[in-house]
Image (cartoon, grey):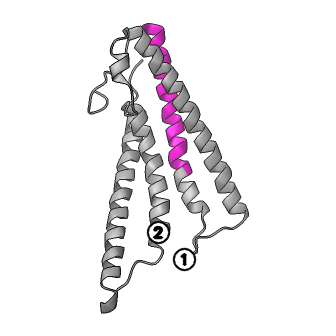
Amino acid sequence: MKRSAAIEWLARALAIIGGLVLIAITILTVVSITGRAFARQGLGPIPGDFELVQVLTAFAVFAFLPWCQVSRGHASVDVFTSFLSDRANRIIDLVSELLMTGMIVLIAWRLCYGMLDKIRYHETTFILQFPVWWGYAASLVAAVLAVIVSFYMLAVRIHEVATGQSAFRATHGGMV
């Protein structure tokens, strides 16, 4: 099966965005803690810093999922599988991919349900008073993209089992 440049680009771009969000979280946290430390000098923490960190972290987690799928970055038990045949390893990869795809679909579905619930009840955060569903929506976008990538990777694993050939060579740095 030919490697999809679009899927790889999508997963990589989302991971980069997730990394930028983590950098923003770090900066926000440092500024807020520094503000607390200099409260006597008239500074203070960033209002709603906990709310922002919570929402941004949720998004970042889902933003990394597609790249983890594409680069085969999920935990594996190589000590056990290294003794198995290539065919057995391809079948294990297929079953693992199927289970992971199922879990990502389940998570995306529940995120959608949770977002709709937050919209319905007009729930807002305590300090900043922004709608809680915004965080759900951001995470849902990343989760839906993870579903797309996951179905692609499931097709790759099915192709690998059917043809007996690995579509991607596993490396420490991801896809080659």
Q: Which quarter of the rendering shows the N terminus? A: top left
Q: Is residue 120 left or right of residue 175?
A: right
Residue 167 visible within the image: no
Q: Quadrant of residue 20?
A: bottom left
What span is colored magenta in the figure?
Answer: 140-164
Percent across and percent down for residue 25 are 37, 63
Judged from the image, the secondary structure of the residue bearing numbered disc 1 is loop
> Is 12 colored magenta in this rendering?
no
Q: Is residue 26 left or right of residue 119?
A: left
**Which residue shows up at 30% across the image and 77% down it?**
34
Dot 1, how many residues are within 10 Å of its Cα: few (below 14), some (14-19), or many (20+)? few
Percent across and percent down for residue 174 are 31, 32
Q: Is residue 17 left or right of residue 52?
A: left
Percent across and percent down for residue 86 are 37, 10
Q: Nearer the viewer, residue 124 or 151?
A: 124
Q: Which residue in the rendered view is the most extreme toward the right?
A: 120
Residue 77 numbered tag: none
**Which residue shows up at 43% across the image and 15% down it?**
90
Establish if 2 lies above or below 161.
Answer: below
Return the residue at label 1.
127
Q: Is residue 158 left or right of residue 5?
A: right
Return the residue at label 2.
50
Q: What's the magenta bit mostly, secondary-structure-wise?
A: helix
How many angstroms separate mark 2 from mark 1 (CA)? 9 Å
Q: Which residue in the rendered view is the most extreme toward the bottom?
A: 41
Q: Amino acid at mark 1?
A: Ile
Judged from the image, the secondary structure of the residue bearing numbered disc 2 is helix
Percent across and percent down for residue 4 are 40, 28
> Is 152 colored magenta in this rendering?
yes
Q: Does the CB distance between marks 2 and 1 fall below 8 Å?
A: yes
Whichever of callouts 2 and 1 sits on the residue coming sooner in the sequence is 2
